[in-house]
Image (spheres, helix red, strand yellow):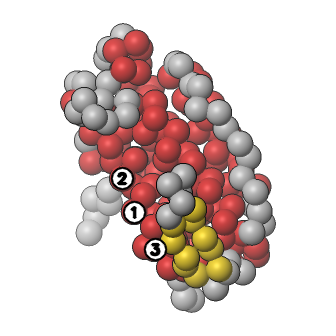
Amino acid sequence: MALTIYDAAVPVFTNALTDMRAWLDKAAVVKPEAELLAAKLTDDMRPFPAQIQMASDAAKGAVARLAGVTPPPMADTEASLAELRDRIDRTLAFIASVDPAAVLAGDDRPIELKFPNGMGYRFTGAAFLTGFALPNFFFHITTAYAILRAEGVPLGKSDFLAHLGQPLTDL
């Protein structure tokens, strides 16, 4: 069976967001919440909550564009780890609600991204997913992970890839 655009999108977004949600539980016991919410890697970077918000937007926006539907709006107002968990949950619920057949039909769908400065890109669905949506999503997932690591949260590669479960011992 060939890899489909659905396979390359929905499970990937779902797994990474689910893994990221679990990081919040580890983070909550390491540092005061206010410090985590203000954390960023460098002065000209947006803070930790924005990384989760942008990962959420990237995932729900990509699935919506591929399926030809409108993603649910989510205000970027999360001010606690609980609110960030809720945002991830709402994003996961939206992704799960999208008809797989609609996503599959998005392979050749024309997709336009317009930026506030008036510039943008035109893609087919497949080129959008592989060339923009997935790299952009993983930029924000990885940045959130790096911020938590820099703040002393004990995360490792097994947390980043938690969706795989425990490695096999009988290989």
Of label 2 and label 3, which has the lower sequence position? 3
Amino acid, disc 1: Pro
Drawn side of residue 27 relative to residue 61, left or right: left
Q: Residue 62: give x, y in percent of width and height.
A: 59, 62
Q: Residue at point 46% right, 30% down?
A: 49
Of label 1 and label 3, which has the lower sequence position? 3
Q: Residues within 10 Å of mark 2 (few under 14, many from 20)?
A: some
Q: Which residue is mark 3?
A: 130
Label 3: element kind: helix
Drawn side of residue 170 relative to residue 91, left or right: left
- Identify whether 123 is placed above or below 19: below
Q: Report if the CB atoms under discs 1 and 2 are less than 8 Å apart.
A: yes
Of residue 26 and residue 138, the one placed in the foreground of this image is 138
Drawn side of residue 75 relative to residue 134, left or right: right
Q: Return the mark for residue 139.
A: 2
Q: Residue 117: give x, y in percent of width and height.
A: 50, 55
